[in-house]
Image (cartoon, rainbow, N blue to C red):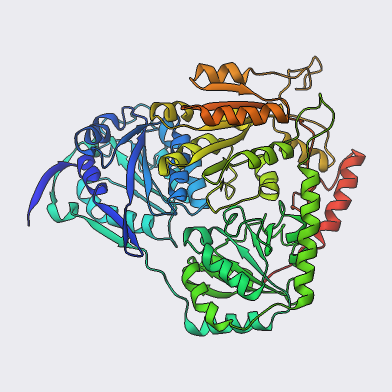
Amino acid sequence: METVELTVAAALVRFLKAQYVTRDGVEHRLVNGVFGIFGHGNVSGLGQALSEHGGPELPFLQGKNEQGMVHAASAYAKTRRGLGTLACTSSVGPGATNMITGAAGATANRLPVLLLPGDVFANRRPAPVLQQLEHSLSQDISVNDCFRPVSRYWDRIQRPEQLLASLPEAMRVLADPAERGAVTICLPEDVQAEAYAFPVSFLRKRVYSQDRLEAPARKVEEAAHAIRSARRPLVIAGGGVYYSEAGPALRALSEQTGIPVTVTHAGKGSLPDLHPNALGALGVSGTAAANEVAERADLVLCLGTRLGDFTTASKTIFQDEAVQFIGVNVNAMDAHKHGAIALRGDVRAVLGQLAPLLEGVRISDDYASEIARAKGSWDALHAEIVSSRTEPEAPLRQASVIRIVNDHVGERATIVHAAGSLPGDLQKLWRSRTEHDYHSEYAYSCMGYEIAGALGVKMADPSRDVYALVGDGSYLMLHAELLTARQEGLKITVLLLDNHGYQCIHGLQRSCGGRSFGNELRYRAPAGELAGERLTVDFVRHAESLGLRALQARNERELAHALEAAAREPGGVLIYVPVDPYAQIPAFGWWDVPVAEVSGEPAVTEARGQYEHERARQRFLG
């Protein structure tokens, strides 16, 4: 057997360069670069190996925050539809644990990312090494064990030859649409530098095939019969439609049958929002049209959705007593949710199976009229919600900002957003033209994803104009990858909507009967609470200090001009937009956030009564 002597780190780097995934006859490199921040736990091992063996096939990208690196890798993988990702490496200790939040986000969103945290010495000679967390009852635990519950695959390389078994399994998980998520390979710093005679065959090119799995014919026929028998069928388009490139097939099915389409965050744009059969977002942050039609649906075709709590409005949306679900998903757990007829398979492939079995199927004229009426009513209400105020000095409302941005960016633009009030407002109000113009991280709803995610999108598709829509709270939490974007010559435009704190949760707090407490950026008052004057931040000067062009917009005219100016800039831009902190848009779906059952405050008691009323509408769905 031919061998080559390499360190563990060098073998890992050379292995990663030879990994590919293929779908529909097209090959894609699986791991396209390594984000990293070096420390004593990886600089002389993996860092040295990347310097010597990485090359243009596996470039090194200097991160500024370990969590941000993982968010960028996740966004990169999402933009590439899971057909490629990035790796992230850190030193031991805090560098490693900083990646855990990003790992959880990747796994929650079913996105492949490869994490390579440094680990404590396998030989234990210098223990406790700097940044090692000791346990009195075991010497076989490090902080990297915290990655286990948030990783789809986890391993620790204690001996060089373990790499031979571990890496192929790690790549299999990264390349599998049904299994993927965060993959964590822990690398003790001494083992990284150890040499071993690795088989040359281990380092040869490997191609993992993403075959388009079809569902069993018998189950497809059962599902087709259920659709033919339904009076009020409805489609939920989730991320699986996007990842499987099933948008055209979905459109064809909807136009063939007249069945209306609702979307999750991950499925938004699968059918353009202006299509007559597109009812928009479903659930807690859903449109009035989607939720109205869904309430009486008797059959729900769930395409590539994990049916999260927001999508079902905490299981209050579907009120038909006999409602039935059909789940189409590569992931068996998701396909079976709500007692569905489970069609485990690729969404595009399964829609291809269903289409000929539904020839001649058409919704009734009455149902079609109801859909058109609901959509027309929502369009009128939408126009009212996003309109600008007539008072000249009034601050912009967030809803108006969304409409202005929507009007001014083209089809080659992608907006990126995550936590806070922006995702809910955007899912309702943003009019998607394509499946690429809306990029949301909402499975984990992680503050701080926005700017790092925008970097990942731009890296995956440099031809797109990328906009990070972010609140002041999220910006303050994680903005450092703006420097990485500048370092890499990648333009990102940040729209920073300043509402003076965490107003999304502030609104929820007040809707639950609570008084204003702890959610706004304020000085501490003499009475002891954070209820003094507003704490202001000069975000314009801050952005300029990072090397960005900074613009301000306080009304519609200024925002339109700022967007036009930003489009002309060759480098990164931040547009600062102060917005009305208390202007909220109507909610058309309920979210189960428990209200205190006993309280001395009358407003809380009243809110608890309303909570009990809404909770009574929750249903067990299968």
In the image, residue 220 above or below residue 245: below
Q: Is residue 137 in view? A: no
Q: At 86% from the left edge and 57% from the top edge, which residue is drawn?
A: 613
**Total marks placed:** 0
For the view shown, which residue lies furthest in the top direction?
526
At which x and y percent is residue 39?
Answer: 33, 27
At which x and y percent is residue 368?
Answer: 75, 72
At which x and y percent is residue 273?
Answer: 65, 55
In the image, residue 541 above or below residue 27: above
In the image, residue 410 above or below residue 347: above
Q: At 57% from the left edge and 61% from the top edge, which residue is drawn?
A: 305
In this rendering, position of residue 355 left or right of residue 463 = right
Q: Quadrant of residue 63?
A: top left
The front one of 510 and 528 is 510
From the image, which quarter does the C terminus lie in? bottom right
The front one of 169 and 70 is 70
The front one of 316 and 228 is 228
Q: Is residue 471 in view? A: yes
For the view shown, which residue lies furthest in the left direction?
2
From the image, which quarter does the N terminus lie in? bottom left
At which x and y percent is residue 70?
Answer: 44, 40
Q: At 81% from the left edge and 34% from the top edge, which residue is drawn?
A: 389
Q: Quadrant of residue 392?
A: top right
